[in-house]
Amino acid sequence: MPTSHHVYDRVYLLGVDGAGNFFQQADTPNLDRIFAHGAVNHNGLTSMPTISAQCWGSMLLGVSPRSHRLTNSIVDTFELPKSFPFPSVFSITRKAFPNAALSSVCNWNPINHGIIERDLGVRKETGNDEEVGEKVIQTILEDDPKLLFVQFDSVDGAGHHYGYGTEGHLNQITVVDGIIGRIYDAAAQAGRLENTLFLVTADHGGTPQGGHGGPTDAEKIVSFFAAGESVKEGTIDEMEVRDIPAIVAFAFGLEQPENWSARLPEDLFVDGESKPRREEDFDGGRKKYSDRAHQNTPCDAGKTLGDFVDLSRALCYYKLDGDLKDEITGGCAKADGKLYFTEGFYGAAATLDDCVVNGSGVDVGKNDFSVCVWIKKPEAENDEKWCVFSTKDDEDPRDPGFGFLTHQMELETRVGTIDGTVGFWRPMPLNYQNNWFHFIAVIHRDTNRIAYYYDFEEDVENDAESVIPADLSLTREAMHFGNHTPLTLDDLLVFDHALSEDEIAKLKAYYEQ
């Protein structure tokens, strides 16, 4: 591809998990010499929330977590498909260079399968930080990768253990600095640094108390280093971790994908031209239901739900049209806290603000079951949780029962057993913030599989995290939904069986009448 700027043969991107911008306080003789004539930024902005999957996801996929929706639980559970709406730097590099060697060596292996797409022919390896260093040198010598990504994890571990910015944390940065120095020297001796862009970055920082995920400067401000033939010596004024894919694309002479919001930083390359950041639309190519913007259907618009589906197999049905009545049993739930009846998807809805609703139990027994509900919620901050529906003590993993909760950008299924919680995680639909979406969870106990449907279309069906005992009765005397953060729910139903595709289609027809 013809370009008007310098194009590199290789890009090496080395990431130090949890280092923040604490490089400045640590003894880093190797970084000092490697980037003595390079570009440095100690005031880069990472992604929010400041958690590993969200930050590494932005660093490799070129968008904010609101778009890629990856979380630690998600990347630990699911492989990233080749068709993911936001292509990684590995994906665009593979497309442009079909025969090139590509490598990723990570201490935290979920990056390899949960953030880098499968089936790209990327050499993926894992190990502790010392092993990572040796494997990186090995792949440099054996494969001469065009794109090499490396993730060290021990600095983050030291931050959690000792506190970020403490002596123990800073000492571990020095240890990893030594590993980076060995990698650099081995590559130089093998002639691999000729026309190579060498990058080092952190994904996030942390607090002196040993945590991260929040918006403090210690958590969200990170360092970034660059060295290469066309790198402009000095300080980079402004950049974010999601801009790193734009740097890689520019270095290879590639156009970045239209749906990236990554932006080439100013003052990084002598021949670089920075453009305005593209806004993210948060739809990611996903099919949208009623464009997530619709007119609310009045309560008397047409036929009732019972005209479409067999409600004799429903265990509870909370219409939430001005009251907390269960249409199946006739009983009423009780609100503890601030509850308002507001405009719903279908008639009215219950908005819970610092509120928990408690009702009578559901007789699931040992059957398959399904939960259906309309959800509207704001974007979460930190690790806020909403209980969508639960029959168990959400804080006790061994309390029998089941529950559905939302976290920052994901939905979780929990089934309590005597051995602990069986979990299942999935990202929220794109563009969910403050917009209605319909959620169905179908639990197949005979096959130990769980299916999620968003807006009546199957999003995924997968094995549960561990086995739900076949002889475990999930019948409970009480249920609850909501907790102490805002959440709006409409038409909450539980069925005593796994809904069929035909039944789900009939539910959709009811809401589209």
Image: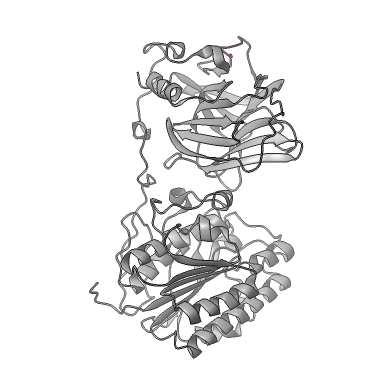
Extent of the magenta region: 325-330
Report the residue at 51% width, 26% height from top: 373
The part of the image, by quadrant, that contains residue 259 is bottom left
Locate residue 121, reporting x and y percent: 43, 64
The mark total stands at 0
In the rendered image of this protein, does residue 274 appear above or below residue 184? above
Compare residues 26 and 122 and report the one nearer the observer.
122
Q: Is residue 265 visible?
A: no
Residue 149 horizontal/vertical position (percent)? 49, 70
In this rendering, position of residue 476 left or right of residue 512: right
Residue 56 locus on image (x, y percent): 51, 60
Q: Please check the rendered image and state whether residue 8 is part of the magenta-colored stretch, yes or no.
A: no
Q: Nearer the viewer, residue 12 or 5?
A: 12
> Is 326 part of what is drawn in magenta?
yes
Q: Is residue 381 above or below residue 130?
A: above
Residue 7's image quarter? bottom left
Quadrant position of the N terminus in the picture: bottom left
**Nearer-the-camera pick, 409 or 183:** 183
